[in-house]
Image (spheres, rainbow, N blue to C red):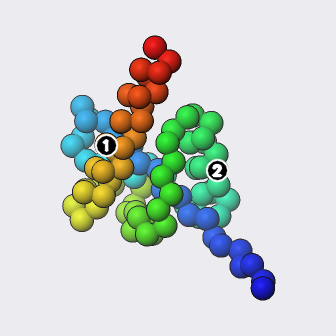
Amino acid sequence: MEKRNQITKAVALVYDEKESRTPKVVAGGQGTIAEKIIETAREAGIHIQEDPNLVELLSKVPVGDEIPVELYQTVAEILAFVYQINEKFKEKIG
């Protein structure tokens, strides 16, 4: 069976509760651009959440715009998970 090359897509979000009440899309792309976004996140130690359906929806949001209301719950759950991981990591390293 021939394996198809799947196009990689990535979207980067930023959330600073002091600056805005809503996460914003700060980068997005596919192919080489997506790979660079993922590489940059890994190098910076940023958590990467793999969710093709969410990426598809977020990729329609222009860079610099806040995420749409319809995605608040999903993104909030991911951010809560990431914050929890970060806290456990901080406790572990002291």
Q: Amino acid at mark 1?
A: Ala
Is 18 situated above or below 12? above
Residues at marks 2 and 1, CA–CA distance in whole angstroms: 25 Å
Instruction: Judge whether residue 60 can be spotted in this image.
Output: no
Q: Is residue 15 above or below residue 8?
A: above
Q: Which mark is residue 80?
A: 1
Image point (64%, 46%), residue name = 39
Look at 57% across and 34% down and name the residue there. Answer: 44
Which residue sits at x=42%, y=20%? 91
Q: Can the viewer see residue 84 in this picture?
A: yes
Task: Provide residue 52's location: percent of width, then percent of height.
Answer: 49, 67
Q: Image check: 17 left or right of 63?
A: left
Instruction: Give the residue type that dot 2 points to.
Output: Lys
Earlier sequence position, callout 2 versus callout 1: 2
Q: For this rendering, which residue is in front, 57 or 93?
A: 93
Q: For the N terminus, give its image quadrant.
A: bottom right
Q: Position of residue 45 (x, y in %)?
A: 55, 34
